[in-house]
Amino acid sequence: MLSSKKKIICIAISALIVLIVGLALGRNAIVRFYVDRKLRTMEQRYNLTIRYRALTIQGLSTLHLEGLSVVPLHSDTLLSMQHIEVKLSFPRIMMLKPVVKYINGDDLAIHLMKDSIHSNYAFLFHVDSIINTPSQDKCNYEVQTRRILDLLFGLLPSDASFRNIQVTYLNQSDDLALLIPVFNVKKNRFITHIRSTENGQQSIWVCEGLLQDDERRIEARLYAKENSKITLPFINYRWHALMQFDTLLFNMAELKEHDHVQSLNGLARVSGLTLHHERISPDTVLLDSGSFAWKLNVGKNYLELDSSTEVIFNRMILHPYLKLQRGKDWHITMRVDKRDFPANDLFASFPPGLFSNLDGLKADGTLTWHFLLDVDFTQIDSLLFESTLKSRNFRIVKQGKTDLHKMNGPFMYTAYENGNPVRTFEVGPDNPSFRPIGYISRFLPIAIMQSEDAGFFQHSGFIPSAIRESLVKDLKERRFARGGSTLSMQLVKNVFLSKNKTIARKIEEILITWLIETNHLTSKERMFEVYMNIAEWGPLIYGACEASHYYFAKEPSELTLSECIFLASIIPKPKHVHWCFNGLTLKPYYADFFRVVLSRMLLRERILPEDAVGASPEAVKITGPAKDYIFGRSADTMVVKENQSLPSFLVPAPNRGVLLHHKY
């Protein structure tokens, strides 16, 4: 019995020796067969031609590859390398989980090229181009993330040496080249110099950091040599933006998986950031310091930015929450809550150049901000939107660059066309076209409010339900189909802000509206009076007085209910007024608008039933100079250059009509 066991053991050992000897003698052929098979699969999947001059293996775990090239079909060479030596962990090879222990390479060149139609790197954006994922796991974000991390950290060596790494990008007239003469990793740490050349502009960067497989951690710090700023390449070409910074710090660490959730911690910190993009702000934005410390949870069908995430810009600290969940369609939840923080921290943290009117503003008191957006794209009508900024003991200690009391007295107003100033006039008694609210027909403010903002005298500058409804409509139509602005916001936009449509301008509009309304810097009555005197009512027609003379050759105090409803209808699209008419008769569809506004005025008891007698679209008779414009004649005669005198018909007689008493 014992003898039989010895024989079996001897046979097993002999077979193992034969297998090892066979692998040793035929390892090159085996490795080439395996590599060639994998390369053929990649070639077929991505329409590539992958070639190498020689492939050998030394010992049981060191690969030598010579003359590698990757060429996409009908395109230029994407990648080439003269020589690379890779030493793998033999025990991990036996477990079919290769881990790179050392890499030594020479002359790695990556050429990215794109013309107006084709590029040699488009295949990189194909499904599974990074990792071969089984079909059942393609929609499992946790599995995909874990496998990509395994691949990434498996390829990160504790020691490496590369010489002459070049990355070039060419897109018609734009070119970028990055050259790394030497890249060494010693015991997981590295430091290297990068020479950047973009469209002839050269700079030298320094990159240092840590690549650690056992702790599943990556750290990197990027800064410019000789205390200059780094200009991020490609940004200008791709987004027509300029971004520079002094130092950028990034780190990422993988946390242990729990309950089928893959978690990552990370930090991105930037100092001395300058940013210029016409859609953000017309001025260059400066940020002294900002950081983003994040925790990302990845589940089977969702990505979640944990509320422990911390965003810091200057003196402001926020903890946002974000979740993207995939079902039949996406479900997005965003939330920010910040309670009882010093009000001045907010205004002192605004980067210079972002909100020019508020530069230098100082405040006392505390603020509490709550924001919630919940969108299920399978049922957009269920969208939730909440945004409140509440104050306690708040007061403005010092005005910023612009005095927000500006509207309380006479001031100069400039009207713009396509971003260019076309008229400048005073909003005040020295302007012959200015009319106090009491000298305007009582029907006109009512018609405008029922059309544009019925709750103007009740709300504090914002109507969350209107913003929600506009978001629902915009998401359904996948375009900016409707705005949620109140009359207060429209007034602030016209009086205080530039005509550049930027993200910064919209946020500044919201902030100035909040400051004016919350602190009662200007009364509601005065705000509406200003609005009535600067609103556009046609081609270069501004204010109720000019509008009433232009369309009806009469004072605004003499306007009828029908004429006021017609004028209210023009405000959303003042330059399209001629489309409302067949000849001098309003088109039939206009009757719908007229009926809606008139019924609102009656139902909300803003007018009496006897006021509505005879009111109809047919009662609107154009008797003023607008007849020429509506009949399609050239409006060139209407063009008024900045500071030029008004046409004679727009300068009414000194008699300003009858003083009226309004009830809104």
Image (cartoon, rainbow, N blue to C red):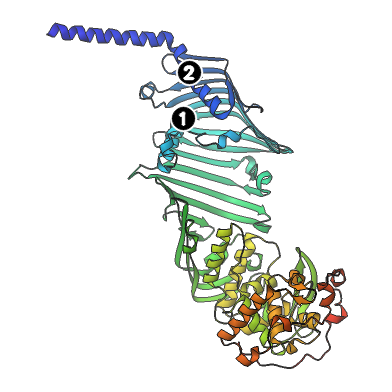
Q: Residues within 10 Å of mark 2 (few under 14, many from 20)?
A: some
Q: Is residue 592 above or below residue 95?
A: below
- Regarding residue 329, the answer to whether it shows in the image is yes
Instruction: Please tell me which residue is depicted at 51% across the width and 44% down the height of the picture.
Output: 250
Q: Is residue 654 left or right of residue 73?
A: right
The quarter of the picture where residue 477 lies is bottom right
> Which residue lies most toward the left here?
1
On-image quarter of the N terminus? top left
Residue closer to the observer: 209 or 373? 373
Percent from the top left, x then y, of residue 378? 47, 56
Check whether the beta carbons of the residues at disc 1 and disc 2 lie within 8 A of each other: no
Percent from the top left, x then y, of residue 610? 63, 92
Q: Is residue 234 above or below residue 26?
A: below
Q: SS for tag 1?
A: helix
Q: Residues within 10 Å of mark 1 (few under 14, many from 20)?
A: some
Q: Which label was assigned to residue 155?
A: 1
Per the image, the residue denoted by label 2 is 63
Query: Disc 1 and disc 2: Cα gap in Å?
Result: 14 Å
Instruction: Please tell me which residue is depicted at 51% across the width and 17% down the height of the picture.
Output: 64
**Amino acid of disc 1:** Leu
On-image quarter of the C terminus? bottom right
**Amino acid of disc 2:** Leu
Q: Is residue 358 left or right of residue 36?
A: right
Percent from the top left, x then y, of residue 395? 54, 76
Q: Is residue 650 left or right of residue 458?
A: right
Percent from the top left, x then y, of residue 587? 72, 73
- Regarding residue 526, the answer to whether it shows in the image is no
The quarter of the picture where residue 546 lies is bottom right
Q: Which label was assigned to residue 456?
A: none
Work out whether mark 1 precedes mark 2 in sequence or the reverse, and give the earlier one. Answer: 2
Residue closer to the observer: 244 or 563? 563
Q: Is residue 545 above or below residue 502?
A: below
